[in-house]
Image (cartoon, grey):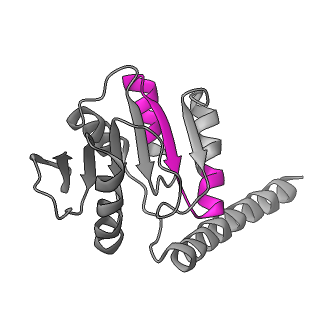
Amino acid sequence: MDYVYIALLVVLVLLMFVTVFVTFVTGTILTSAPWVPTSKVISRKMCEFGGLKKGDRVLDLGCGDASILIVAAQEFGATCVGVELNPMVALMARTRVRLAGVQDNVKIVRENMFTVDLPDVDVVMMYLLPKATHKIEKRLQDRYKHLTVISHGFELASEEVGKEMVKGSTVRKYKW
């Protein structure tokens, strides 16, 4: 009987590694960028730095596992939309949102951030590679007249209005 539990545990661990590998590979193939999660500490700082308050509408482009959105909804009362192209990562995001109990305030859309119909929002969060960051910036400026953009790690071409270091990462703030 003990061998059955050990065998099940081994199978579970192998499935976990295969899932992570497939998620990484499909993310890289589909989006030219791997999924890299944002820690809760950095997610919280991004929300604070963005001045989030109850009722704010947040868009996370390339939302990954929805870490930022879960913090925004749970701790700040924001209504959120996450855009994620990778189907496996989008599924993980939806699962995490449901497990966190914020499914009424967080919607995950499996779409391409460069072609998705951008909703009305107050704040955009992003943790994107420079090529994607620069490509999406023009689209955001054309769509939104007044917007706060919080970028984890990478700069936009626009002039930043603030910058903070959090656990070795840079969080930048832009407004227009």
Residue at 73% across / 64% down in the picture?
10
The answer to which image quadrant residue 71 occupies is top left
Confirm whether residue 68 shows in the render: no
Q: Is residue 136 above or below residue 108?
A: below
The answer to whether residue 52 is left or right of residue 5 is left
Position of the C terminus, as image quadrant, is top left
Residue 137 coordinates in the image, percent (x, y): 29, 61
Residue at 32% across / 55% down in the picture?
142
Residue 62 coordinates in the image, percent (x, y): 46, 57
Residue at 34% across / 35% down in the picture?
122
Q: Which span of residues is magenta-colored? A: 69-92
Q: Nearer the viewer, residue 103 or 115?
A: 115
Task: Please check the rendered image and state whether residue 86 is part of the magenta-colored stretch, yes or no.
Answer: yes
Task: Please check the rendered image and state whether residue 122 is part of the magenta-colored stretch, yes or no.
Answer: no
Q: Nearer the viewer, residue 35 or 150?
A: 150
Residue at 10% across / 45% down in the picture?
162
